[in-house]
Amino acid sequence: MQMNPTVSTTVQAAPRAGGPLAGRIARVLMMIVIVALMVLPFLWMLSTSLKSQQYILQTTPQLIPNPLTFESYTGLAERIDLGRTFFNSLFVAVVGTAGQIVISSMSAYAFARLQWQGRNAVFLLYLMTMMIPAVVMVIPQFILVRSLGWMNSYAALIVPGLFSAFGTFLLRQAFMGIPKDFEEAAFVDGANHFTIFWRIIMPLSTPSLATLGVFSFMGYWNNYLYPLFVARQEDVVTLPIALATLQAGPRALTEWNMVMAGAVITVLPILVAYLLAQRWFVSGAISSGIKG
Amino acid sequence: MSWNSGIHKWKWVALFLLPGLFGLSLFVLYPILSSFWLAFQDWNLLRPPEFIGLGNFQELMGDRDFWRALGYTLTFILMYVPVVFVLGLALALFLNQKARGMLIVRASSFLPVVASWVVVSLIWKWIFNPQYGLINYGLGVLGIQGPAWLFEPQTAVYAMVITSVWKDVGYIALLYLGGLQNISESYYEAARIDGATRWRVMRHITLPLLTPTMFFVTITLLINYFQMFEQVWLMPMRDSAADRQVEVIVTEVVKNAFSYSRMGYASAMSWVLFVLIFAITIVQLRLQKRWVYYESAE
């Protein structure tokens, strides 16, 4: 990759041969190439989903669908209950996110703002669970869900994810950064811990809560490995599972327009949400970087 | 102070902590412990579990499928990690320039990070379609006969590495951007006063001060790619040579657990994966003294 290694505009190094104009043109070209590489696969997905079967099987691919048709979407709706599957994904993600925020923020308050014996030991336990790879958890969680009689239920999809130590860890960091002055004044005025938590700590932590919210929503919305084994039935199945089944399962499709229609439905909500709230997605994704 | 002492204090601790701690114990700690216990059992979900000591681990040593999966995992890591490490850095240096429209470039390089692995796998599976896919069309335009990609093990690995780099490069660039923005402007001013060339600034200021970020990136990449799953599970064409041969550790665990109902054996394998990740992270932490430069240590 040929690119200008300038780190900061304040560094005025000796001008290179070719001059600044050539450099600027090269930079604009590079910008176009990067955007094209990142966006084109998504456009190709959208374009494929809007073609009929005979037009996707052409040796010369056409980027703009002509004729444009929604038949892949209607065809897909005949195979899977799209409304129900979409609702399942949304319901699991919204309830899971809300639950994770409530539980993590309460636990974080106990670790950041309450003094008690054994606090550090218990927190260390939380940290240690974060080191365990997801795949170690999948088998016993599956067995647990099965013995609780939760197979193919919303509870199986939502509940185990609520208690990941990561949210507690993230919010504890945020809560510890809030000065104690406010709450000391409030205690003198007769406030209790619940008031402090709800009226002072939570409002002052909205950036971290938003980060956790987006992290959690993305996790639930995109999750595949775990739901694959606990929720296969159509009344609870989520979009990624239903979508993957289209291509990988026994009913594997070769109608790529339908597969791409499913991909559009799965990815569009999260892409739109990302474009509306980029900042939180960036912080949420950075936090979620390490699988666990 | 009454809110901070005795029974009253524990009442608050219980109120705030217990819901989370109870859930963590049941849905996280208990599964971890039972998975560890399972690793020493033979259990097919039907009969009661039977203790077999180190039997699972002994079997693992001689299991050619496991070694093949480990081999593919390492192959993926050896191909993917250096590429995404360098491209991520290059992208970050590029995005760090102040120029009109750069925010759009930054936003678009992050789109694949937000999309789910299932969607990304399927999009690229279609792009790598040998007959009707974009890649082989592009190669055809250049006069090259494109390979069968996701049908053959070797080319399938390349396809999956390309897909993974596309998905993750924006994320890695973002980690580097954070590191770049932490470098104090005063270093660059000093360099300018000394009349340093761009290359020297890069070589002697930017890169050394970025080594802590590079270290974090390396650890993140290794931890994540020892656990790679979705692309390998979803991308190879059904019943092709690639589908039969290309396995990584996590797909092998999943197959043993959910296709063959060998819960104990699969658990043992997942713990071997944990030990591998743990050991490699420890080695990294040891090695960092040799190449990571911490400002505060000066």
Image: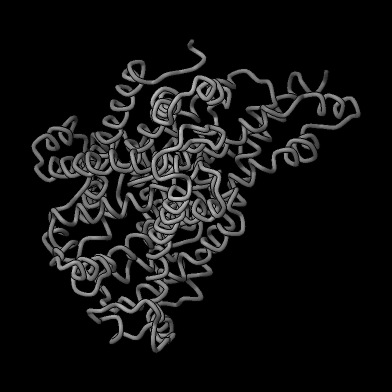
Quarter holding residue B12: top right
Frontmost residue, A84 versus A7:
A7
The percent position of residue A66, horizontal first and vertical second, equals 39, 87
Residue B169 relative to residue B261: left or right: right
Residue in the image at 53% along x and 56% along y: B104
How many marks are shown on the rendered structure?
0
Residue A248 in view of the camera: no
Residue in the image at 28% along x and 60% along y: B234
Compared to residue A72, the image places residue A286 above or below, namely above
Quarter holding residue A75: bottom left
The percent position of residue B281, horizontal first and vertical second, equals 33, 27
The quadrant of the picture occupied by the C terminus of chain A is top left
Compared to residue B248, the image places residue A67 above or below, namely below
Residue that sits furthest to the bottom in the current view = A67
Q: Identify the colour scheme used.
A: one colour
Frontmost residue, B278 versus B149:
B149
Residue that sits furthest to the right in the current view = A189
Residue A91 relative to residue B205: left or right: right
Residue that sits furthest to the top in the current view = B298
The percent position of residue A265, horizontal first and vertical second, equals 46, 71
Residue in the image at 82% along x and 28% along y: A182
Frontmost residue, A194 versus A68:
A68
The percent position of residue A199, horizontal first and vertical second, equals 80, 40
Residue in the image at 18% along x and 40% along y: B70
Quarter holding residue B54: top left
Frontmost residue, A92 versus A235:
A92
Residue B179 relative to residue A134: left or right: right
Residue A138 in view of the camera: yes
Compared to residue A89, the image places residue A49 above or below, namely below
